[in-house]
Image (cartoon, helix red, strand yellow):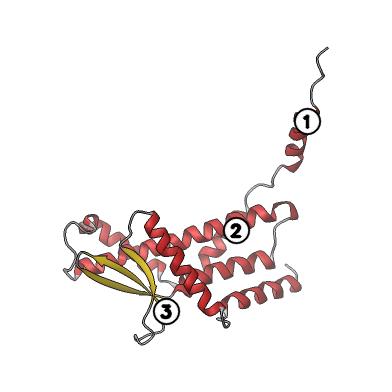
């Protein structure tokens, strides 16, 4: 990795991470819209991610909003930390140490797919962990999240939530995704080219 590349990666990270005018509002809006759509596609239309009341205490900008029977409950989120940080780190790594020219598009596409799958998995874990807290408060009817009445499931979710809350995980997972993508074999462009050549010109014409 050259100094020039390292500076390029750092600049791209700063460009994505700093809440510039417009971008600071645009990313949370896009995240909340995508997360709400993901919950709806998963069959849970009672869950949405909304902007948090700016008068609420704390620096968290969004909340998981759940309609539960006749009532509702909320769980505060920081969508920049949840979604933008891994995206910015992955983009910076690709800028600082880009793959070979023939595999850049593939590796970048796979990296983006994996990092967004990771973000959705984290959001799902937060939702499940929030349900365990809701259940512990005695406000969760039996028909709601019935699986979470199992002590083993509740214990596993709490353990995963503690691991996920570690600052190390926020940095390590994008690094792991980048490393896994870089370990993929090179595309066999020569073999593909030969196959196309045989398909277009191979074989003798019958006589």
Q: CA distance from mark 3 to mark 1?
A: 57 Å
Quadrant holding the N terminus: bottom right
Instruction: Please name the residue shown 51% across and 63% down the image.
Output: 173
| Residue that carries the numbered disc 3 in the rendered image | 61
Q: Position of residue 20 (x, y in %)?
A: 58, 82
Disc 1 is placed on an element classified as helix
Earlier along the polypeptide chain: callout 2 or callout 1?
A: 2
Image spot of residue 166 (x, y percent): 43, 71
Cα separation, mark 2 vs mark 3, equals 31 Å
Q: With 54 as the anchor, is 147 left or right in this view?
A: left
Q: Residue at x 48, y 58 (%)?
A: 117
Instruction: Indicate the position of residue 169 as horizontal and vertical percent values.
Output: 47, 68
Question: Do the residues bearing badges 3 and 1 touch, measured as CB atoms within 8 Å?
Answer: no
Left of 103 or right of it: where is 127? Answer: left
Dot 1, crowdedness within 10 Å: few (<14), some or many (≥20)? few
**Mark 2 lies on residue:** 179
Asked if labels 1 and 2 touch by Cβ distance under 8 angstroms, the answer is no
C-alpha span from label 2 to label 1: 37 Å
Label 3 CA crowd tier, 10 Å (few <14, some 14–19, many 20+): some
**Picture residue at 52% right of the left edge, 75% below the top:** 26
Query: Of marks 3 and 1, which one's residue comes earlier in the chain?
Result: 3
Where does label 1 land, which residue?
200
Badge 3 marks a residue whose secondary structure is loop
The image quarter containing residue 74 is: bottom left
Disc with the residue nearer the chain's start (2 vs 3):
3
Q: Quadrant of the C terminus?
A: top right
């Amino acid at each position: 990795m050259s100094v020039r590349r390292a500076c390029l990666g750092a600049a791209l990270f700063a460009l994505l991470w700093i809440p510039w005018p417009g971008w600071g509002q645009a990313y949370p809006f896009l995240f909340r819209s995508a997360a709400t759509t993901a919950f709806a596609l998963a069959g849970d239309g009672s869950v949405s991610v909304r902007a948090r009341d700016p008068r609420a205490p704390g620096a968290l900008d969004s909340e998981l909003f759940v309609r539960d029977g006749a009532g509702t409950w909320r769980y505060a989120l920081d969508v920049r930390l949840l979604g933008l940080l891994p995206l910015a780190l992955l983009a910076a790594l690709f800028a600082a140490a880009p793959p070979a020219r023939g595999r850049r598009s593939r590796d970048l596409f796979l990296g983006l797919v994996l990092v967004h799958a990771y973000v959705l998995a984290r959001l799902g874990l937060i939702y499940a962990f929030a349900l365990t807290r809701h259940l512990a408060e005695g406000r969760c009817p039996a028909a709601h999240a019935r699986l979470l009445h199992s002590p083993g499931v509740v214990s596993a979710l709490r353990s995963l939530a503690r691991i996920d809350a570690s600052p190390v995980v926020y940095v390590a997972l994008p690094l792991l995704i980048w490393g896994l993508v870089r370990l993929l074999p090179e595309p066999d462009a020569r073999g593909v080219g030969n196959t196309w050549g045989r398909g277009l010109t191979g074989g003798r014409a019958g006589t």
